[in-house]
Image: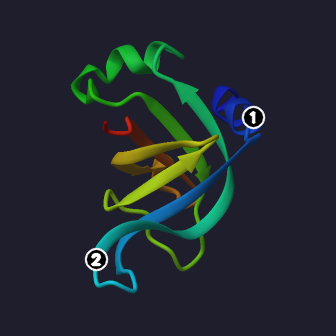
Amino acid sequence: MEGVSMSFGKMNTFIDIARTQTVKDDEGFSQEKEVVLASVRACREGRHGSERWANMAVFSEATDLFRFRTIPGMEVTTAMRILCDGHTFEITSVEDVKGRGMYIEALVKEVKPSG
């Protein structure tokens, strides 16, 4: 248990959890906009962070892992994105850490701007 609590002490990254929403501009053109649903502190672990990544080879498309406290009244899903330090990440998997409802681990894949 000690190893787990240590990693939770590193929640020093600020993230926004957002959902993409299609909005129409004045001329009727649709464009996608990120709507922030929550802003929280998280622990970000890069893909090469630990042996845990080696055990998760099935999630080979994931580039990062974010760990943060459960947000009361909000279910984090793969339909959402995480915005962090000017980067956008698609959530590929969401897991309740140890099934206790206290922390969430989200495996994410960085979205590269097209063009």
Figure disc tally: 2
> Residue 29 bears which disc, if any?
2
Image quadrant assignment for residue 47: top left
- Would you identify the image quadrant in which residue 61 lies? top left
- Element type at mark 1: loop
Q: Which residue is most to the front? A: 27
Crowdedness near tag 1: few (<14), some (14–19) or many (≥20) residues, C-alpha within 10 Å: some
On-image quarter of the C terminus: top left
Residue at left offset 37%, top offset 48%? 91
Mark nearer the N terminus (2 vs 1): 1
Label 1 belongs to which residue? 10
Pick the front one: 84 or 55 = 84
The amino acid beneath tag 2 is Phe
Q: Residue at x 75, y 34 (%)?
A: 10
Q: Residue furthest left?
A: 58
Q: Neighbour class for label 2 at 10 Å: few (<14), some, many (≥20)?
A: few
Q: In terms of secondary structure, where does tag 2 sit? A: loop
Q: Does residue 24 appear to the left or right of 103 in the view shown? A: left
